[in-house]
Image (tube, rainbow, N blue to C red):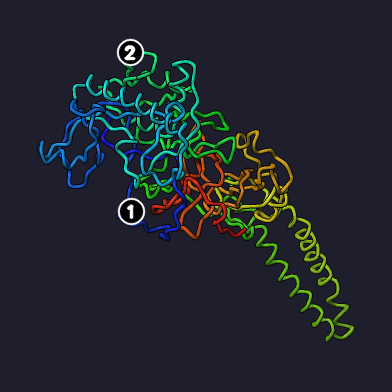
């Protein structure tokens, strides 16, 4: 068990604090995180207290069997060391509890609800006291006793009654904070599972917990890979775009352990906002398409030389015709007869070369602009709807040679290739991202046109990109969609300063420009 405070299962309201996108203060408050049911190690109390402020201490003289005390009062009589304690983790799907004085509760709670809460809380306390005594320590932490009204707490949920122990474990695993709690557990201690129909708890090793608790058996190494969970969750493409950000159902069928994060969450600003550091990204141009500079695979020196020589010869030919016209207009009839034959031969030669050049220029130009491309300017362009790629290629490269293609494996059942601007019934709109680096067009759907692309993670040979809109009110990026791109684009993307990233965008406050 770790020494950490609890988070709320309900996400807090969106903050409107104004902060720079590129310069984030180091003094932002970091909300503490949950832990799971494990035994903590004794350590000195630091200047900044990292453990809970309140604990329940075993007290044989109390009618309840315990006394809730502030940790500071305990340390005065027991020295400066922080007490060991048991962390009690549960879900309100199974146990209905009430925190006294919680302002989020209704002013009046009927007797039936209060009786149900007292019954479930009494059962949890019995489990907690048994676990604490079995561990041979003096204190335990449980939210409704150790969290004061000003602290965050989970919202009430309807209480169901699972019929089997396996279902109980899976319900507990569905909580938002169960995975972080399990990640923070010391591997050397077993997790105690208490249920109403057993007299003794079941001890489960940390390595065996995923297969018991989660349907998809989160196969992350809980002991060795515990610091990148949230980064992986951010890079999942959810089947329902309105689902909670912590949902684990990926459109492409990827599991969390298939994803290798590229960016790193360096700070938690609020319950729904984090700071992304060490991220690569680029802007999306929605204003216009422009000509792209590129380098062909084969050298084009001969073609360019022929084109330039033809241009120079055309200038000489025009000057020759002008000079001949002036010269012949001033000559007498006798001189015209003498010079007519040589000038006629020269005129026919120049005219033949000029006509040949005029015929060859279109072929040379087509060969120049139709050659295979070795490297291009790396640009990202956003287009509303599904455009004709032939027209887009003409605008950017001067001709349609079929070089711009739809990206394979970029689409899913949620991203059909259609020519409509508006997408499904849930308010999503169809957009297309043109990537000139890989000469691909990638369709996607979002509520708002994204203005920034962030490199999120590598998976299955591709890079997952987070397409984000910008919330100018709160100065943070909001995820609109997730797409897959070729890994080569990472080499052309610059690194960004730390940016604020919202886990739960407030749609009413976003401002974008198409």
Which residue sits at x=44%, y=54%?
15
Task: Answer with left or right where residue 204 lies relative to residue 216.
Answer: left
Name the element at disc 1.
Answer: loop
The image quarter containing residue 202 is top left
The image quarter containing residue 168 is top left
Q: Which mark is residue 153?
A: none
Q: CA distance from mark 2 to mark 1?
A: 46 Å
Q: Earlier in the sequence, mark 2 or mark 1?
A: 1
Q: Is residue 142 above or below residue 46?
A: above
Measuring from the top left, give residue 339's x and y in whole percent.
83, 76
User: Quadrant of the image for the N terminus?
Assistant: top left
Mark 2, residue position? 199
Name the element at disc 2.
Answer: loop
Q: Nearer the viewer, mark 2 or mark 1?
A: 2
Measuring from the top left, give residue 179's x and y in whole percent.
39, 30
Check disc 2: other Cα within 10 Å, few if <14, some if 14-19, many if 20+: few
Task: Answer with left or right where residue 78 lies relative to residue 303.
Answer: left
| Residue 350 in sight in this render | yes
Which residue sits at x=13%, y=37%?
81
Measuring from the top left, give residue 73's x and y in whole percent.
16, 41
Q: Is residue 78 above or below residue 341?
A: above
User: Quadrant of the image for the C terminus?
Assistant: bottom right
Task: Answer with left or right where residue 369 lies relative to residue 357.
Answer: left
Check disc 1: other Cα within 10 Å, few if <14, some if 14-19, many if 20+: few
Nearer to the camera, 218 or 295: 218
Which residue sits at x=60%, y=34%?
409
Nearer to the camera, 248 or 302: 248
Measuring from the top left, give residue 504's x and y in whole percent.
49, 46
| Residue 138 in sight in this render | no
Nearer to the camera, 359 or 463: 463
Mark 1, residue position? 28
């Amino acid at each position: 068990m770790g020494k950490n405070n609890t988070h709320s299962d309900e996400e807090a309201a969106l903050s409107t604090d104004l902060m720079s996108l590129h310069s984030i203060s180091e003094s932002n408050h970091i909300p503490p995180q949950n832990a799971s049911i494990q035994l903590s190690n004794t350590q000195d109390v630091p200047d900044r207290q990292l453990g809970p402020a309140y604990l329940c201490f075993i007290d044989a003289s109390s009618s309840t069997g315990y006394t809730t005390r502030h940790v500071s009062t305990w340390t005065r009589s027991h020295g400066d060391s922080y007490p060991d304690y048991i962390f009690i983790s549960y879900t309100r799907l199974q146990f209905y509890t009430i925190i006294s004085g919680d302002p989020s509760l209704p002013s009046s709670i009927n007797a039936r609800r209060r009786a149900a809460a007292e019954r479930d809380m009494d059962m949890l306390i019995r489990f907690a006291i048994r676990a604490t005594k079995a561990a041979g320590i003096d204190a335990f932490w449980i939210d409704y006793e150790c969290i004061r009204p000003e602290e965050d707490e989970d919202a009430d949920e309807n209480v169901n009654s699972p019929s089997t122990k396996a279902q109980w474990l899976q319900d507990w695993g569905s909580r938002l904070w169960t995975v972080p709690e399990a990640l923070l557990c010391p591997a050397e201690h077993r997790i105690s599972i208490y249920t109403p129909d057993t007299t003794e708890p079941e001890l489960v090793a940390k390595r065996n917990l995923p297969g018991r608790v989660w349907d998809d058996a989160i196969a992350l190494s809980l002991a060795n890979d515990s610091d990148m969970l949230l980064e992986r969750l951010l890079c999942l493409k959810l089947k329902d775009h309105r689902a909670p950000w912590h949902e684990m159902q990926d459109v492409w069928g990827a599991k969390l352990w298939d994803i290798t994060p590229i960016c790193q969450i360096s700070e938690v600003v609020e319950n729904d906002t984090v700071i992304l550091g060490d991220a690569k990204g680029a802007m999306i141009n929605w204003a216009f398409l422009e000509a792209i500079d590129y380098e062909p695979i084969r050298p084009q020196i001969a073609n360019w030389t022929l084109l330039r020589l033809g241009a120079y010869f055309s200038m000489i030919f025009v000057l020759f015709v002008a000079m001949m016209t002036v010269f012949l207009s001033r000559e007498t009839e006798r001189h015209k007869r003498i010079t007519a034959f040589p000038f006629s031969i020269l005129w026919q030669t120049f005219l033949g070369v000029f006509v040949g050049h005029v015929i060859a220029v279109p072929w040379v130009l087509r060969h120049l602009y139709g050659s295979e491309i070795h490297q291009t300017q790396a640009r990202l362009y956003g287009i509303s709807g599904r455009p004709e790629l032939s027209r887009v290629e003409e605008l950017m490269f001067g001709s349609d040679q079929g070089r711009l293609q739809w990206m394979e494996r970029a689409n899913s059942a949620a991203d059909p290739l259609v020519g409509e601007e508006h997408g499904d019934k849930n308010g999503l709109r169809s957009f297309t991202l043109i990537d000139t680096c890989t000469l691909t067009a990638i369709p996607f759907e979002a509520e708002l046109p994204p203005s920034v692309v962030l490199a999120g993670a590598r998976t299955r040979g591709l890079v997952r990109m987070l397409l984000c809109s910008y919330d100018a009110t709160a100065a943070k990026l909001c995820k609109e969609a997730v797409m897959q791109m070729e890994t080569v684009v990472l080499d052309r993307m610059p690194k960004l300063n730390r940016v604020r990233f919202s886990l739960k965008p407030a749609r009413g406050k976003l401002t974008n420009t198409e």
